[in-house]
Amino acid sequence: MIRGKSRVDHQGIKVELIGTIENLFEKSQSTNFIQLGQELEPPGALTDSAEYNFAFNRVEKQFETYNGITVRLRSYNRITKEEEFIVFNPISESTWVDKPIKMEVGIEDCLHIEFEFSRSVFTMRDCVLGKVYFNLVRIKIKHMELNIIKKETVGSNQSAITESENLNKYEVMDGAPVKGECIPIRFYLVSTDLTPTYDNVNKRFSVRYFLNLVLVDEEDRRYFKQQEIFLWRDRLA
Amino acid sequence: MEEDQEKFLDEHMAVVRQQAFYMKKALDHNSLREALKHSSAMLCELKTSLLSPRNYFNLFMMVFDELGYLENHFIEESSKGRKMADLYESVQHAGNIIPRLYLMITVGSAYVKIKEAPVKLILRDLLDMVKGVQQPVRGLFLRYYLLKMMKDKLPDKGSTYEGEGGDVNDAIEFILQNMSEMNRLWVRLQHLSSTKDKEQREIERNELRVTVGENIIRLGHLDGLTYDIYKSVVLPKILEIIVICKDTMAQQYLMDCIIQVFPDEYHLQSLESLLDTTSNLNSNVDIKSIFINLMEKLSKFAANADSDVVTINKDLDIFKLFKKYTDKIIEEQGKTIEVARLLELEVAFMNFSIKTYPKNINYVNQILESCVQILKSTTIHNSDNNSMKLLVKLLSIPLESLSIAVLNMNHYPTLMKYMKFNNRRTVALRIVKAVINDKNHLSSPKTVDQLIDFIMPLLQDDKDSSEEDPQEFEEGQVAVAKLVHLVYHKTNIDLYFEILMKFKRIFVKGGIKRMKYTLPAMIFSLFRLSQELVNRPSMGHEEEIKMEDDEPSLKLPMVDQVKIFKCVGELIGLIKQQYPDLSLRLYLQAAEAVNRIPNYHELEEEAYDFCTNSLLIYEEELSDSEAKFAAINLIVSTMFTLVCFGQENYDTLVTNTVSYCSKLLKKPSQCEAITFASSLYYSNFKKQGNKVMDCLKRAIKIADICQNQAKNLYLFAIILNKYLYFYSIDAEFITAEDINNLLDLIKEQIDQIENGSEDQVKDALKYFQNTKAAIKLKQEEQSKYKDINIHAI
């Protein structure tokens, strides 16, 4: 937009499509996985408003937008300013094999529980169903909660950094159960802000999710067990 | 501690009030999201562990009311097109379990109400999810809330939720499972760590029992709960819950709930399993009180039932069953617990048996036998008044329906021996009253022997008898007196007499105080017998008499009037010293009784004796002038009717009587008595007009002397009436002129009275007016009265 009768000289007009992974703490670690440019006008001057159509055809935007703790995946067009857009890639089927989660855990002579979740692979709108059996309870349990933990790994190999975040606190049991008790778990994933599981995006970062079952005793000691779950996007938000 | 509680409760309530306010405000602005946020915040207050169960209940009730508002709004939302399924899911996003589950139940309730979901599915889902609360108090109230919200939505028979929503079996399953879990939570409450002492904790725990009991109440309200379902599903499951929880308080309470809630017909049919369960309960459970409650409830049922209770379950001998289990308790616990507690059980059993089998003496006897067994093995302490009262009760209950039949029970007297004198006396009185209420004649000598034996504490003192309250004493003796009047025999007059003599022989040993009550009754019974004897003479010629009801035959002496009246004389003689006034009257009654029999001449001496005795008492024992006056009038009236004397005896009696009249202390009394006595010279027996006139003239003379007394007018009125009486029966010695002369005399008297202000004068004048009116009436009927000049007064 040219205002008034002014004249704008330019060194050519160019539009770029950039996909970038930024490391928020270590700028040098940032990389662009897409950088495409198109010349719209050779160097010269603009005296009037002009309109240019452009298109980046058949560019594979293979990575979804992600805004994490240490890493941010952004896709944007850049002309004179950045124009960001969101990339979501729903898929029709997950690549992970869905297996139920079954576990027996405990502390000898103190606590022995079994828990099971009917699935380990979920879409982000799914409901986590499970049960916790208390086979032995000798500690004074105050309550039990289910957490979703997000682990974000940036870099690879030795230089990889993993950050964890507890996304919620979902109480599944109040009070202390007795031996033989079975407590149901029903947790709607939509109640939590989640992304699909990302595995080694452009060899730069991964995002993984864990179910964390936590027992808290009367002295606020926490007994927990984490199990990875796999999330995928079956449709746009 | 208490202050802290109040503070905590206030704080929690303040938050609830505030959040409820915001919740409603949000609802008014149709902001469901905000409303849910505030309702969650409100419900978070129920997460507290600071409150005592009672205060937690108060807080709960407050929240409960607010949630009702929310539920209504959910139903409204649904009519605006909101899907309850979505709401049901979205409330489950809440991170805190307490608000989440309360909201789930609230939405679930609306969900069912608008019939978007079959109730059985919602019930199943909620029942599963509420397991998440394992903290006993919070869990109990959460489930209590669930139960309350769903109680009108259960797919009971005839309910609108039946059908797609399930049937009564689903409702029962839901309640039973909820009850099972609630009971577990309740029992667990005792282990909840707390600094408070155990006793206090148990008191608090007990306060929460109604939340568990509510389940049984709900079951009891189900229309679809048939006996078959009860017997095959509900009862076994509840009993299982009770047995496996192994908790004394829960077992005690829930057994009682079963007894109180379910219909008695069901109990009667399933009695065995109910009773059998008691053997599997904790040793601390008070099984007796369970039995007592059960038996009391069934007794009431039996008492009000239209049909015979026994027919409800023909195959079952209810009595035998109860007997078996009560005996078992006695056998197992007899040595360890107080006698009173066992007796209490037997009292309940007795009550039950009497109400259920009102005429079964054998059952009563069996229960009494059990009691004898109890008492044989233990001794009742002297101070154990409770046991004594229970024994009294035990022995009194059968009296209501069996009355005198109890006398045939061999264990009855055995049991009485275990009681203290005072208590035996109480039972004796109950027995007497029962027999009186029964109104059946006492005609069996054996029964009377037994009865006398039983009521001996009323009849005689004992070495351990103590001072009795005068009122109670009188009550007892009056009852005994009534008892005597029940003696009767319609066919055998000799036996009749003999039975009376059984009482007599005991009465005369009862002491003077008792005799005051018992002897008059006996004497009047003898009078009655005397009359019976007139109507149907003794047939016994000292021959063997065949007894009724299998009693051994015995030789009875023949009764005659002489025997009867000899006996009467003897009896009065026993009390005349202490009760002269009473004896005087009895003598006169006796004389009259003799007079009533046709062959009275045979008993002239007895009758003469009775009269002289009454005169002797008059002379020797009475001192009070009022009493003397009353007595002499009585003697005169009696004497007037008697015809049983020969000339000599009669003259002696009359002469004496009249002379007593003139010896009365006060002149007016003399005058009055002589006036009355004048009739003695003109009775059916003998008419001596001149002697009558002597008397009357003497009376007038005395009345004249009494002039200055106000009473003198009254005396004249009496004499006038006596004149009129003789005139009316056409006595030859009274003429109209005599009457007119008397009237003149009276007129003089009246004229002398200047102001008739005194009450006695007024009364006398009134008497005259009435007499005058009577004469006037007579004048209209009979011409002979025309000669009387009534205008004089």
Image: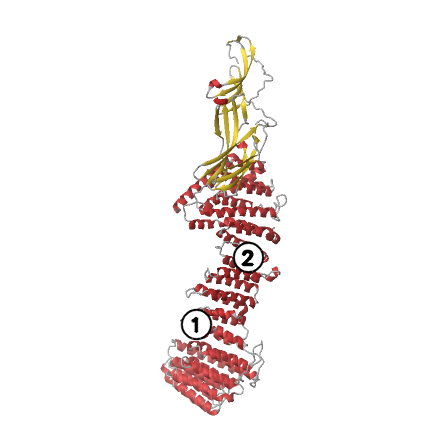
Residue located 41% across and 47% down the image: B196
* Visual colour scheme: secondary structure
* Crowd around label 1: few <14 · some 14–19 · many ≥20 (10 Å): some
Quadrant location of residue B667? bottom left
- The answer to whether residue A36 is left or right of residue B582 is right
Image marks 2 and 1: residues in contact by CB distance under 8 Å: no
Residue B169 numbered mark, or none: none
From the viewer's side, name the closer residue of B748 and B313.
B313
Query: What chain letter is assigned to the residue under label 1?
Result: B
Quarter holding the C terminus of chain B is bottom left
Q: Distance between the Cα atoms at labels 2 and 1? A: 45 Å
Give the SS element for disc 2: helix
Q: Chain of mark 2?
A: B
Q: Residue furthest right?
A: B163
Toward the bottom, the furthest residue is B648
A208, B477: nearer the viewer? A208
Observer-nearest of B712 and A172: A172
Residue B454 image position (x, y, % from top left): 49, 72
Type of amino acid at the residue the image marks with label 2? Leu
B201 over A11 or under it: above or below:
below
Is residue B327 in view?
Answer: yes
| Dot placed on the residue nearer the N-terminal end, 2 or 1 | 2
Q: Quadrant of residue A119?
A: top right
Give the amino acid at mark 1.
Phe
Name the residue tied to disc 1: B473
Image x and y of residue B553, in percent = 56, 80
Badge 2 local density, few (<14 within 10 Å), some, or many (20+)?
Answer: many
Q: Which residue is mark 2?
A: B275
Q: In the rendered image of this protein, does residue B452 appear above or below residue B375?
A: below
